[in-house]
Amino acid sequence: MKVSEIQPQLYQQFSNILQRKHLSHAYLFSGGFGSFEFAIWLSQALFCENLQEGLPCGICRACRLVATEDFADLHVVSPEGQTIKTAQIRTLTQVFSESGYEGKQQAVIIEAAEKMHPNAANALLKSIEEPESEVVIFLLTTNENMILPTIKSRTQVVHFTKNSHHFQHLLEKSGLLKTQAEWLAQICDSPEKAMELSQQVWFSDGVQRLEQFVKLCATSPSEAFLYLKELVEIFDDKEKQNMAFELLLQMFRQEKMRDELLKTFRAIEMWKSNVRFESCLTFMVL
């Protein structure tokens, strides 16, 4: 999906910035909804061989390579495991000291920037304060409160809010069923992630089982307890379990099941403290 559809207001705002050539050297994109797509689009604008009134054409060699994250002067950093390690950022700062391969300009996208190790964040701070080359840095986060204050203060903060109704409409236009699009719009921060999940058999089955679980919680808690094994079976890793809790929050909220909603919040806290997923679900029905 185009960035103009995902974040139409920000698209207009940044189109004006690009046309005036006023792009800053460091941004903190907070919120997650479409932020990576936006960072890619702005990176294309830095390297495009055929700018259209300051905007990337999207079809030239540079634009195509940036879109596939295969352009020599685009550097994408993601967590290795649970953190972005100091060595990853130090490798990046060595790149900052050099000119780009294709030109003078370089672009850096750091995903889940809140997961930077404190030493990594401090190493990056020096490069933001005293850039040695023409580098534009995009820090992406879903929790800006976890970003080092000294880094945050040296970036332009841009909030990527999610309009769930608009997101759902875009997913339906892409061919998803209304119910499926509704749930995906609630828990996903990008159209790509939503479309990827929609193709996963376990996700469709998982949603159906959660819907059944919610019905049983409302009508027969004892049956809900017996049904827990169905959930544990399909939500068998941390990422899936996190999605299960997010969906349960939405489902209980939709059904106005206040007590169950509060129990879910508590169960999430337990789960984040490394209590087993099954034990957290058991707490919800007892």
Image: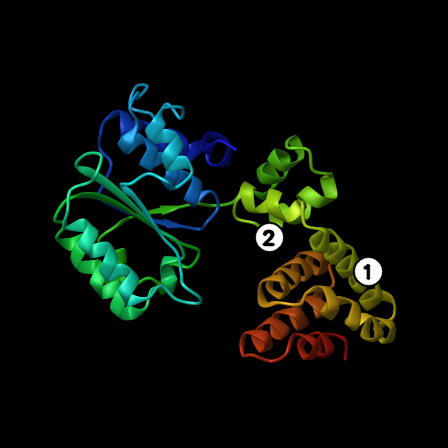
Q: Residue at x 40, y 39 (%)?
A: 38
Colouring of the image: rainbow
Question: Residue 165's spot in the image, x, y percent?
Answer: 61, 40
Residue 255 visible in this rendered orientation of the protein = no
Q: Count residues near mark 2 (Cα–Cα under 10 Å), then give few for <14, some for 14-19, many for 20+.
A: some
Q: Which of 240 and 262 is in front in this view?
A: 240
Residue 103 falls in which quadrant of the image?
Answer: top left
Distance of label 1 from label 2 (alpha carbons): 19 Å
Q: Is residue 238 above or below residue 138?
A: below
Q: Name the residue under label 2.
A: 187
Of the 4 image quadrants, the one containing the C terminus is bottom right
Q: In which quarter of the image is residue 242?
A: bottom right
Question: What is the x, y in percent for residue 94?
Answer: 18, 55
Amino acid marked by disc 1: Gln
Dot 2 lies on which element? helix
x, y (%) of residue 235? 68, 65
Which residue matches tag 1?
212
Measuring 68% from the left and 50% from the top, which residue is drawn there?
200
Residue shown at the point (55%, 41%) measured from the top left = 191
Q: Earlier in the sequence, mark 1 or mark 2?
A: 2
Q: In which quarter of the image is residue 238?
A: bottom right
Q: Is 255 left or right of 126, judged from the image as shown?
A: right
- The amino acid pointed to by label 2 is Ile
Q: In this view, does 261 lie above or below 36?
A: below
Crowd rating for badge 1 (residues with CA inside 10 Å; few <14, some 14–19, many 20+): few
